[in-house]
């Protein structure tokens, strides 16, 4: 592929990308704020669940290791 063809196809690609971006419906401030709060809340909830699972597994393993004298 020649350089001129690559430039032409790249320009066409960028033009198509720009046209698609014009079709995007961007969220308003309230939608953005609500979505952000949902994502942050879910992230914190999952982090707490993983922390609790880690704590329980650590306690169980320590009990098992204590039984066998380690």
Image: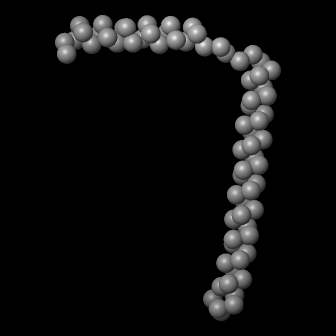
Considering depth in this image, is 25 or 10 the residue closer to the camera?
25
Most extreme residue toward the bottom is 69
Instruction: Name the spot of residue 32 as percent of width and height, x first.
Output: 74, 23
Residue 8 sits above or below residue 55 on the image: above
Instruction: Name the spot of residue 4 as percent of width and height, x first.
Output: 23, 7
Residue 51 sits above or below residue 70 on the image: above
Residue 22 sits above or below residue 51 on the image: above
Where residue 39 sits, quadrant-wise, is top right
Where residue 25 sits, quadrant-wise, is top right
Residue occupying the point 72% across, 83% down = 63
Q: In which quadrant will I find the N terminus? A: top left
Most extreme residue toward the left is 2
Instruction: Name the spot of residue 40 as percent of width and height, x first.
Output: 74, 39
Q: Is residue 25 left or right of residue 3?
A: right
Residue occupying the point 75% across, 62% down = 52
Q: Is residue 42 left or right of residue 3?
A: right
Residue occupying the point 58% across, 10% down = 23
């Amino acid at each position: 592929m020649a350089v001129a063809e690559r430039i032409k196809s790249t320009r066409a690609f960028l033009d198509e990308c720009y046209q698609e971006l014009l079709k995007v419906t961007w969220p308003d401030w309230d939608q953005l704020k609500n979505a952000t709060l949902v994502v942050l809340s879910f992230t914190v909830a999952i982090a707490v669940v993983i922390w609790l699972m880690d704590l329980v597994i650590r306690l169980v393993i320590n009990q098992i290791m204590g039984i066998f004298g380690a």
